[in-house]
Amino acid sequence: KTAIMATASRVFTRALCYGATKSLAVDQGALRAGGVFGGGRHSVSGVTATVFGATGFLGRYIVNELGKIGSQVIIPYRCTEQETAHLRLMGDLGQIVIDPFNVNDPESIKKYVQDSNVVINLIGKDRQTWKYSFEKVNVEIAETIAKAAKEAGVERFYHMSCVGASPDAKGLKFQTRYAGEQAVKAAFPEATIFRMAPMVGVEDRLLNSYAFMTRRMPYLPLYDGGKSKMQPVWVHDVVKAFVETLKYEGTKGKLFEFGGPEVYTVKELVTLVERTIREPSGGLHIPSELGRMLDAPRSFLQSQIPFPVPTHTMLTADHIDELESDLVVDQEALGFESLGIKPSRIDQGVPIEHVRFWRSGGYDFGSTFE
């Protein structure tokens, strides 16, 4: 009886969400929310968005922003239902629809985009597994979603990629990210593509990883001395950019690159984290070739078994290959400036606040003091 009631509730909720108009064009692109996104969670923005990959880092912020302006959000998920619980609270009653789907079934994907006017692809992986390679996740799945959105007549399609995507990059993730962009553009020419530098925020896998390795591991590897450059960007600034591009038709078919106002080397970022959490330096300079050799046994084993081999992403050969590329935005590309947004520094204030909770003994303490 309980299972029947749960199924009926889910079907009814989907019916409420799918009952909305599919047209996104309201007053020359200004969406209904008390003007241009001027309403709240109880308002009606005119947006019905399907968000693939909503349970990830950026996904939760995108969903929250869509819910905040009164949008209906459809969230197909592959994880356990418990991992989506926090997303249900981000919109008005019945406006967040969460349903399991099979990413390998094109028909399953079509079902979740057919009633939407905005589709956002956030699916991605930091490392390969036996079942999901970079090629599978970054190219094949992205292309399938883009084709389904085009066939359904979706007005806006967003594809999230990363700074460093290039056919000439040494890292396989960056090569497949670029190939995924090309596949998406071929399937959906009007797609808006975002390339982000490594993002920081409460759930990030950059500063939190440096803090974790500093606190919990014997050493923190600085491959080739940590000379690789990157331009970290605060996740909330990326979300602001998403909302701005959604307002205007002129952003269709454009590629944007987003990075923070400062460029750091990996060593400088590690030092920033160590000072923030008040821990002595644990950085160990390791030649990149030695790092690849140390990961070779795990990499071989991973290719032979159907479940992940436990190891930190920053210890993998794929990550070492990615550090061969400087993750800095192209100054000629469209970015925050073209949208009238001033990005926040990540070394002060709220963007780095979450790192302080890694301090030994609590927020106000630590192992060292300056």
Image (spheres, rainbow, N blue to C red):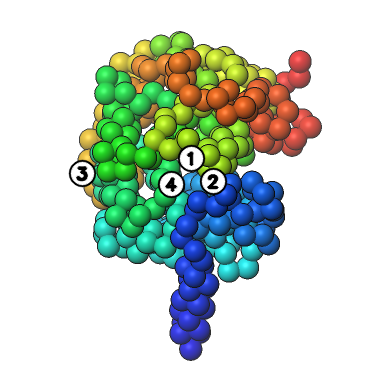
Which badge, 3 or 2, is on the more N-terminal residue?
A: 2
Between marks 1 and 2 in the image, the one whose residue lies nearer the viewer: 2
Between marks 4 and 3 in the image, the one whose residue lies nearer the viewer: 4
Instruction: Residue under label 4, please give it.
Output: 156
SS state under label 4? strand
Instruction: Residue under label 3, please give it.
Output: 304
**Residue type beneath disc 3:** Gln
Write the residue at 22% across / 40% down.
Answer: 303
Q: Quadrant of residue 359?
A: top right
Which badge, 4 or 1, is on the more N-terminal residue?
A: 4
CA gap, disc 4 to disc 2? 14 Å
Residue 280 in the image: x percent, y percent?
Answer: 64, 19
Instruction: Residue under label 2, please give it.
Output: 28
Residue 113 in the image: x percent, y percent?
Answer: 38, 58
Which badge, 4 or 3, is on the more N-terminal residue?
A: 4
Crowdedness near tag 1: few (<14), some (14–19) or many (≥20) residues, C-alpha within 10 Å: some
Instruction: Residue under label 1, please give it.
Output: 249
Residue 74 in the image: x percent, y percent?
Answer: 48, 60
CA gap, disc 4 to disc 3? 40 Å
For residue 104, above or below residue 262: below
Which badge, 1 or 3, is on the more N-terminal residue?
A: 1
SS state under label 1? helix
CA gap, disc 4 to disc 1? 9 Å
Between marks 4 and 2 in the image, the one whose residue lies nearer the viewer: 2
Write the residue at 47% across / 57% down.
Answer: 23
Are the residues tagged 1 and 2 within 8 Å (C-beta)? yes
